[in-house]
Amino acid sequence: MYDFSGFGTVVDVGGGHGMLVRSILRANPGVRGTVYDLPHVVATVRDEVAASDLADRCQVVGGDFFVEVPEGGDAYVLKSVIHDWNDERSLTILRNVHRVMPADGRLLIVEPVVPTRSLSPRPI
């Protein structure tokens, strides 16, 4: 639902198996992408991307977003990442993204909506 066509490179931080970036690239032929996650997570993604029609536009990078985030994106996406961490760890991730993001870059955070009411069962 988001228009990614105006970006040169989209970096999916904590991108897992790369489904989001691959979907973005298929829908936007002029965009390049990076899948970034722990090395053991992206190990299989590297082979899948290399064997696909996206090999020339998608790179796969292993690393730790608590330490660093790849440079070169003008859009950074964190999908279902921040909710997994406490405030301190979340701020570390966000600072690492901010450090490499250009001044006119865009940060997109995609998280589930949690209802405000209690999720515990109602008393009988």
Image: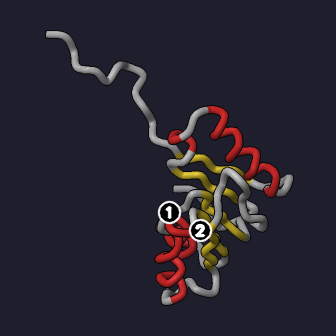
Q: Is 37 placed left or right of 101 in the picture?
A: left
SS label for mark 1 = loop
Q: Nearer the viewer, residue 39 or 48?
A: 39
Q: What type is the residue that disc 2 sits on?
A: Val
The residue carrying pointer 1 sits among few (fewer than 14), some (14 to 19) or many (20 or more) residues within 10 Å by Cα, namely some
The answer to whether the residues at label 2 and label 1 have Cβ atoms under 8 Å apart is yes
Q: What type is the residue that disc 1 sits on?
A: Gly
Residue in the image at 56% along x and 39% along y = 85
Q: On residue 16, which mark appears? A: 1
How far across and how far down the image is residue 6, in percent? 70, 65
Q: Is 71 placed left or right of 45 in the picture?
A: right
Position above or below: 63 against 120: below
Residue in the image at 64% along x and 40% along y = 90
Farthest-out residue, right? 103
Determine which quarter of the picture holds residue 116. Answer: top left
Residue in the image at 51% along x and 75% along y = 43
How far across and how far down the image is residue 37, in percent? 58, 63
How far across and how far down the image is residue 96, in percent? 75, 50
SS label for mark 2 = strand
Q: On residue 35, which mark appears? A: 2
Residue in the image at 21% along x and 15% along y = 122
Farthest-out residue, top? 124
Determine which quarter of the picture holds residue 89. Answer: top right
Q: Nearer the viewer, residue 22 or 61?
A: 61
The residue carrying pointer 2 sits among few (fewer than 14), some (14 to 19) or many (20 or more) residues within 10 Å by Cα, namely many
Could you tell which of marks 2 and 1 lies nearer the N-terminus? Answer: 1
Determine which quarter of the picture holds residue 63. Answer: bottom right
How far across and how far down the image is residue 1, in percent? 51, 56
Q: Locate the C terminus by quadrant.
A: top left
Position above or below: 40 against 29: above
